[in-house]
Amino acid sequence: MRAGTVVRDRPRAFDWRSRVRALDWRICLPAVALCATGVLLVWSSTRALVPDDPLTYLRRQLGYACAGLVLMAALAGAGHWSPRAWGVPAYLVCCAGLLAVLTPLGLTVNGSTSWLGLGAFRFQPSEPAKPALVLALAALLGTAPDEGDPRPAARLPAALAVAGVPIGLVMLQPDLGTALILSAITLGMLLLAGTPWRWIGALAGGAVAAAALAWWLGLLKPHQVRRLMSFVDPAADPQGAGYNAIQALETLGSGGLLGHGLFHGDQTGGRFVPEQHTDFVYTVAGEELGFTGASAVLVLLWAILWRGLRIAARATTPYDRLVAGGIVCWLAVQSALNIGMVLGLAPIVGVPLPLVSYGGSSTITCLAALGVLMSIGGEHRPASAVRL
């Protein structure tokens, strides 16, 4: 071989062993268990929706879960992946998707134009907008002190502008639940970035004032006002605005300690709870699996969130810490909102229960985010892969 000849490494074959080693089983196992539980609950609650083919929703949700798990494993073992490189493009693409929803391409479901439809294919851009916002804010707020101004307050206006675009587009759909989640992600990441509490309090107060002003000016849709009023007193209109809240709570508690058994829920079988396979899937767990099964779902969710907090606490760079913390904040707030709706502790705002509710956009997005979380916490990542 002549001097000066450059020897290039041959590309490595795809190594499944390295991908398996990259998985954090303290996240992976609870995620798989939640997906399996969700598939069964969706099957149980949708058999009557398509009498000619009761397996329709089962096949769909099983396909979504499998696709999401494959994507999760791929992201967890990606090695030299760099979300900072494609976080901003992902954010821009998601904003374009949210804008497209407001065109004739958008589909209206339950009073909210949140979907893009191409034939039989439906996609909800607001779901991937959640992790996209996490990555975009982390790229902005995760600047190391030697790379620029380390003061969080100096980046606050830019962060609010970045968050304001998707929040504003989502409110135009209107989708109050997703707007609340995006707002919570923003506040949580600002806090993680070191923004003073007084600024966080001022922003939260401003958001409440803006909501009150929107109510007073009549900017909220009629169905949104009815939902908020029913949260205050669902018994005031038990057959109208308060019906969902009353039926959800009764169904959840009807299962007792051990439940009536899978596929044996009277309320579920009678379809007394609207959207019982999506927003109110937790009621199916309570009725058919009882307090034990419903509590197990909470434990599995908590296991993922706790592990995510540990990963965020041990992250070696500000950017990784913000990404991990933002993902945990998103999943925690969304889970709390969904379960709070069922328990009557939160207004009915129509958000899915992560990994359990029916839906491809939500399921695949959540699993992909867990893959990113595992890649941050994985010891297989070289230092160059996380360098700011």
Image (cartoon, rainbow, N blue to C red):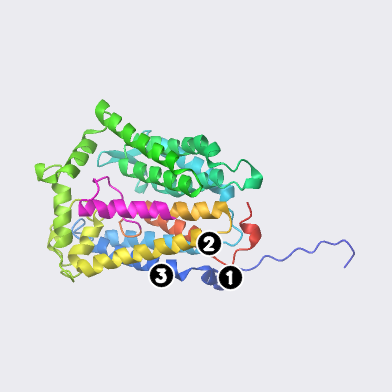
Q: Where is residue 181 in the image (x, y as percent from the top left)?
A: 37, 46
Q: In terms of secondary structure, where does tag 3 sit?
A: helix
Q: Where is residue 91 in the image (x, y as percent from the top left)?
A: 49, 43
Label 1 CA crowd tier, 10 Å (few <14, some 14–19, many 20+): few
Using the rendered image of the protein, determine whether residue 97 is visible from the camera's viewpoint: no
> Marks 2/3: CA distance?
21 Å
Q: In this view, does 104 lie above or below 330?
A: above
Q: In this view, does 273 lie above or below 180?
A: below
Q: Give the range drawn in magenta.
A: 328-354
- 332 within the magenta span: yes
> Marks 2/1: CA distance?
27 Å
> Marks 3/1: CA distance?
21 Å
Q: Give the residue furthest to the right.
A: 3
Q: Are marks 2 and 3 in contact (CB under 8 Å)?
A: no
The residue under label 1 is 15
Tag nearer the camera, 3 or 1: 3
- 160 within the magenta span: no
Q: Where is residue 386 in the image (x, y as percent from the top left)?
A: 61, 56
Total numbered labels: 3
* Front-lying residue, 30 or 149: 149
- First in sequence, mark 2 or 1: give its number: 1
The residue under label 3 is 29
Tell me: 235 left or right of 42.
left
Label 3 CA crowd tier, 10 Å (few <14, some 14–19, many 20+): some
Label 2 CA crowd tier, 10 Å (few <14, some 14–19, many 20+): few
Residue type, mark 3 in image: Leu
Residue type, mark 1 in image: Asp
